[in-house]
Amino acid sequence: MDIVTKKQLNILIQLAEADKHFAKAEREMIFKIAKERNYSDEDVNQLIRNPEPIETLGALSSDQKLDYLLACIRLIFADHKIFESELIFCKGIAIKLGFKKTVIEYLVENFDKETEETLKSKVFQEFLLT
């Protein structure tokens, strides 16, 4: 089992449940990511039933950290509803990933407007904690 994928799926599952409603679109997105990374449905279901504590995320590469963050933003948009509880959760994840919490507002506001490369560049220039 790939630990990087497992941690990401665990975060996404907890984010999906942050608004107390695990939407079908969110569930489908999580299972799609899992399938793309050869992660079994049973392993995902196990994580859904028993989410793990979110520990330190500092050992990830810069690209992995941004991938985690962008996956969170995609999940927020998956059900076409943005809840305050989801934003608060994402801000906590952003900080654990080494970003300023304000990165979440930037990504939510610009996610549909900018290319992923532009977002990536801006995030690394302006939102990394130093």
Image (spheres, rainbow, N blue to C red):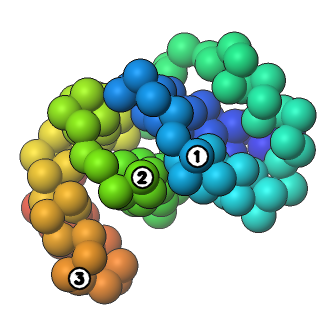
First in sequence: mark 3 or mark 2?
A: 2
Residue at image position (30%, 49%) is 81
The residue at which mark 3 appears reads as 114
Q: Is residue 2 left or right of residue 8?
A: right
Residue 19 relative to residue 88: left or right? right
Left-right relation of 12 to 84: right
Q: Nearer the viewer, residue 55 or 115?
A: 115
C-beta proximity under 8 Å, tags 2 and 1: yes
Label 1 element class: helix
Cα distance in 3D space between marks 3 and 2:
20 Å
Q: Secondary structure at mark 2?
A: loop
Residue 112 drawn above or below residue 19: below
Q: Front-most of 32 and 38?
A: 32
The quadrant the C terminus occupies is: top left
Quadrant of the frame with the N terminus: top right
- Callout 2 amino acid: Asp
